[in-house]
Amino acid sequence: MGRQLLYSEQEYARVKWYIVSSGKDGTIDDIMCVTRHGYLKAGQIQEQLHNEGLLDLNEIREFDE
C-alpha cells in the first residue's frame, strides 16, 4: 500500500499554477505561500513538481540549507 497524499488535486493545481506563473523556485516557503497546511504536504507537492520536471529538488534543497 502506498503512502496517503495529504493534498487534493485542486490544491496541487493551485501550487503548480503559482510556481509556474510567478517563476518561483518551488522551495517549501514558496509552496507554503499557497497551502499553509504543513511542511509534509508541501514536501509531497514539491516532490510531485519535481517528478513532472518543473523543478530540481537537488538544487532547491541546497538553497534551503
Image (cartoon, grey):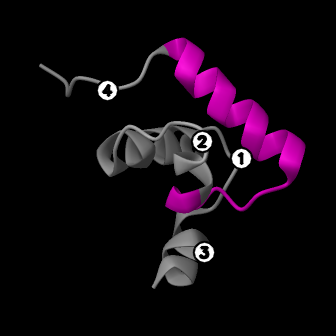
Q: Which mark is residue 6?
A: 4
Q: Position of residue 61 (x, y in %)?
A: 49, 74
Amino acid tagged 1: Leu
Whether 58 is drawn above or below 65: the answer is above
Amino acid tagged 4: Leu
Amino acid tagged 3: Glu
Q: Are marks 1 and 2 in contact (CB under 8 Å)?
A: yes
Disc 4 from disc 1: Cα separation: 20 Å
Which sits earlier in the primary sequence, circle 2 or circle 4?
4
**Which quadrant would the N terminus be assigned to in this image?**
top left
Our reading of the magenta stretch's main secondary structure is helix
Q: Are marks 2 and 4 in contact (CB under 8 Å)?
A: no
- In magenta, the rendered stretch is 9-29
**Which quadrant would the C terminus be assigned to in this image?**
bottom left
Q: Are marks 3 and 2 in contact (CB under 8 Å)?
A: no
Q: Which mark is residue 54?
A: 1
Q: Is residue 26 magenta?
A: yes
Whether 60 is drawn above or below 30: the answer is below
Q: Which mark is residue 49?
A: 2
Q: Secondary structure at mark 4?
A: loop
Q: Write down the residue under mark 3.
A: 59
Q: Nearer the viewer, mark 4 or mark 1?
A: 4
Which sits earlier in the primary sequence, circle 3 or circle 2?
2
Pick whichever, 17 or 62, lies toward us: 17
Q: Secondary structure at mark 2?
A: helix
